[in-house]
Image (tube, rainbow, N blue to C red):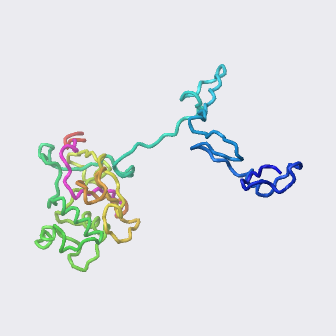
Amino acid sequence: MTACLSGRGFCQGPASTGHRCLDCQKAALAPRPVGGPASITNATIRPAITPAAVPAAVSPAAPPARAGTPAPVGGPGATGRPAPVMPPASAAPAGGSDAPRVVYRGDSRLLTDLPRGFEARVPLELEAARDFIRLYTGVKQLEDCAFAEDVRKRRITLESDSPTAVHTPVDLVRLIIASRIPGPAVSTDPDVACGGYASGRQIYRIDTSHLRVVPWNEAVPGMTQRQTSFWPRLLLDRDARSLDDATTIAVWNVKTGGTREVMFLTPIPRDTIATHTSATDA
């Protein structure tokens, strides 16, 4: 009889045949333990294999470049293919590539008459400007808006001041463009013709590269209105994530009435304004 590999004593089969019982076959095929103390199998002591005993894999050296072939860039093992270009990390949200970088305004005043830049006839505080957007997206009721007192005293005129009126951004554009009463916005135009208001006036160039187009549903938390293709685009500071942390707020009309007017609900700072042409220029 031969020693049984299963460790259960001795095989019951003839030793001369070299046959193994089923237990011996299972034991022979079972994986041997690796690592830790030396393992004992078949009464034979085998040394444990440790990671330090396994030689590290060595990358084959890159073959020498053939004559007339540019050497691969990147050191040994480089394939010669250009490394993938990763976009730079940015804390600000993406988007805004279609926002106008410059807009124009025709105005009879000289630049020296604008120490604080352009302001609306009825200037809005920052929170009131935010509330204008909230009102016209259905997030806030008029009575809760910061400019409600101005509406009650007729300093600001809305298309409807009914408590049950439903306002949309399209209504806001129509109000600013069509209203003949001084309102809470400063109008500009991406075109130097300024919508026909350039004749006989100073033409000012306004840098808007610090603004970007922000999707309405991202800019206005809690908005439930369904946006349509007729809505204007909302412009906020490039680093603003929503209306709540924006300091510059404008709407850019790209549909209604054929005009592409950009209307600022916040003042336009003096340091973004430069003279494009003077009223006295030929």
User: Residue 164's spot in the image, x, y percent?
Assistant: 25, 80
Give the residues drawn in magenta, as a range: 257-274
User: Residue 123's spot in the image, x, y percent?
Assistant: 15, 59
Let me know if residue 270 is in the magenta part: yes
Answer left or right for 268 relative to 78: left
Residue at 41%, 65% (x, y): give it.
Answer: 229
Q: In the figure, residue 260 lies in which quadrant?
A: bottom left
Let me know if residue 72 is in the magenta part: no
Q: In the figure, residue 66 lies in which quadrant?
A: top right
Answer left or right for 51 relative to 248: right
Residue at 27%, 48% (x, y): give it.
Answer: 104
Residue at 49%, 40% (x, y): give it.
Answer: 85
**274 is higher (above) or lower (below) than 229:** above
Q: Quadrant of the C terminus?
A: top left
Q: How many marks?
A: 0
**230 is higher (above) or lower (below) than 86:** below
| Closest to the observer, 132 or 182 | 132
| Closest to the observer, 130 or 90 | 90
Answer left or right for 41 relative to 170: right
Q: In the figure, residue 149 lies in which quadrant?
A: bottom left
| Closest to the observer, 186 or 145 | 145
| Closest to the observer, 138 or 185 | 138
Residue sitting at the far right: 17
User: Residue 114's spot in the image, x, y percent?
Assistant: 13, 47
Residue sitting at the far top: 67
Answer left or right for 32 relative to 263: right
